Every structure is written in structure tokens, then in C-alpha cells.
Image (tube, rainbow, N blue to C red):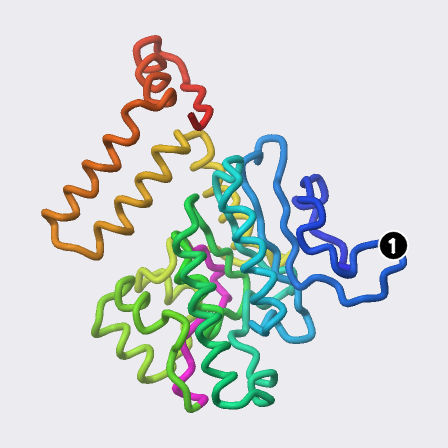
Amino acid sequence: MLRALPRALRAARPWGSLLARGCASGDAGPAPEIQVRALEGPDEGITEILMNRPRARNALGNVLVSELLQALARLREDQRVRVLLFRSGVKGVFCAGADLKEREQMSNAEVGIFVQRLRGLMDEIAAFPAPTIAAMDGFALGGGLELALACDLRVAASTAVMGLIETTRGLLPGAGGTQRLPRCLGVALAKELIFTGRRLSGVQAHTLGLVNHAVAQNEEGDAAYQRARALAQEILPQAPIAVRLGKVAIDRGIEVDIASGMAIEGICYAQNIPTQDRLEGMAAFREKRPPRFIGK
């Protein structure tokens, strides 16, 4: 079973038997490597994916990747999810990257298939319809940073350590790092970081623009998570359909020329016009009261 969760998760609503293997009473099977929680109360609308593979420092092995893909497939259809937050249940680690010990046992063909699955996982995270936030309270190396790069927003503890270190292992980033890091930081800086395999602290990453926020670590070791949750709380009151369409407009528009991007924005805007939330926003403005958005 998973170890005791922080107080913020103890009041959360678990989502059924999404990954029930090892959870039933008397079941001696292995525990799930992720846990999905939908928060309640003032945090309702925030869903968390907790990675919990302590012996491997949350390394991305076959089981963890499969469980993440299963969770994303289910969550993307749930309109109650307004913000999806990725965090770690292993103190001092967000995700140590791909499981190289597991990979050593694979043939070249199997490695190619596994890396393709990793790339597909990152694409699923990037394409998730609601905003996604990575809370990096520890090491986020290689595939761990690629996972964070696939998220919309990143928050790091000042003591976190991150980097695309694949060249130091005789590899190159293969799960989107060579594509998402340049789009985040620019080509020249991304090349420097990938060529050197350099590691950055949370403060350095914030200075470069790699993370949205860097916060001093606390005694509990969850400062990035706390800041990420506060950031999610800022998103919650906003119109969910408008937020999701805004994400589509940005993600699709950044890949094309400005004229095409403007056309994409226009299409997204048109889709938002008939929503009840837009009418509620106008009414709330007219009546000088906070809007009550329902996601319709």
C-alpha cells in the first residue's frame, strides 16, 4: 500500500479502482506506482497524479508509464477536472528519468518501442484538455524534466535539481526534450543545456524561464506542491471552457505563422460564444458580482 499521504491529500476523494492492483484487502500484489486524487472543498476541480515508486526514485519504467497512460485516458474525459497537477510521493525526487536498469534488460528493438511509448506519454500530457502543472520538489532529470516540460506550467523548489542529462549517459533526449526545451527557452540555450547535460537548481531554472515559479523549500519538502496548488486555485474560478480553448489556441497557434495563429484564435473564440459561461460572465460584469461558471 502507499505510505501515509500529506495532510492536503488525506481529505481528498480517491477515484475508485483506477489502479486497484494491490489495493484490495489481503491482496499481496504490488502496490500501484501512481495514485489519482480529486481534491474537495475549496480545491474541488483540482486533480492530482501522485507518482510513488520510491525504490526507483519514480523512474519511468513500463509499469509507471502504463499507469500514467491509463490515468490520463480516464481523466481527459472527466469534465470535473479543471486543473491536473503532477507531484511526487517520494521526498527529494520528482522523477529521476527513464528506468535505465530496466532498459538494460531490453533488446535494441524493445528499447525503441519503449522510447516511443515514453514519447506518446509526453504527448498525452501535452494534449490534456485542462491546464497541467508539474510540482518539482526534488530531482527532475532526463525523462523527469521531459514530463515537466510536457505540462503547461512548472513550479520548482529552490533546491530542486533538473536537467536533460542524457548526453552524460551516452544518449540524447528521446521523449520530447529536443523539441519542447527549445520552444520553452530558445534554440541556442536549449542546445547549450542539452549538449552539456547541465543540471540547474530551481532558482537557476526560474531565472532562465524554465519554470514559472521557484520557492524556498520547507521542512515538509513539499514547497513546490504547495505553490502549485495555490496556482491551481487561481485557475479554478475562471470559466473552464474558455481556459481550455485558450490552451488550444496557444498550443496550436505557436506552431504556425501569426496569420494562421490568428485564424486558430478566431475559431476558438467562436466556439466559446454560445456557452452559458460567456453569458454568465457578461451578466456578472453587468450586475457587479463574481461570476458563477459551470463549464457549459
* Left or right position of 65 against 202: right
Q: Is residue 195 magenta?
A: no
Residue at x-position 52% and y-position 76%: 98
Q: Is residue 157 magenta?
A: yes
* Structural crowding at the residue carrying mark 1, measured as other residues with C-alpha within 10 Å and reported as few (<14), some (14–19) or many (≥20): few
Q: Which residue is mark 1?
A: 25
Q: Position of residue 102 (x, y in %)?
A: 60, 83
Up the image or down, 20 lies above or below 64; here it is above
* Quarter the N terminus occupies: bottom right
Image quarter of residue 265: top left
| Residue 161 seen in the figure | no
* Residue at the right extreme, as displayed: 26
Residue at x-position 90% and y-position 58%: 26
Residue at x-position 42% and y-position 82%: 166
| Residue 65 seen in the figure | yes
Up the image or down, 165 lies above or below 118; here it is below
* Left or right position of 206 against 162: left
* Left or right position of 234 against 35: left
Q: Position of residue 259 (x, y in %)?
A: 9, 47
* Left or right position of 256 against 89: left
Q: Position of residue 162 (x, y in %)?
A: 45, 71
Up the image or down, 274 lies above or below 235; here it is above
Q: Position of residue 63 (x, y in %)?
A: 63, 69
Image quarter of residue 254: bottom left
Q: Which residues are magenta?
A: 154-169
Q: Secondary structure at mark 1?
A: loop
* Quarter the C terminus occupies: top left
Q: 137 or 107, which lies in front?
A: 107
Residue at x-position 42% and y-position 88%: 168
Image quarter of residue 90: bottom right
Amino acid identity at mark 1: Ser
Q: 237 or 209, which lies in front?
A: 237
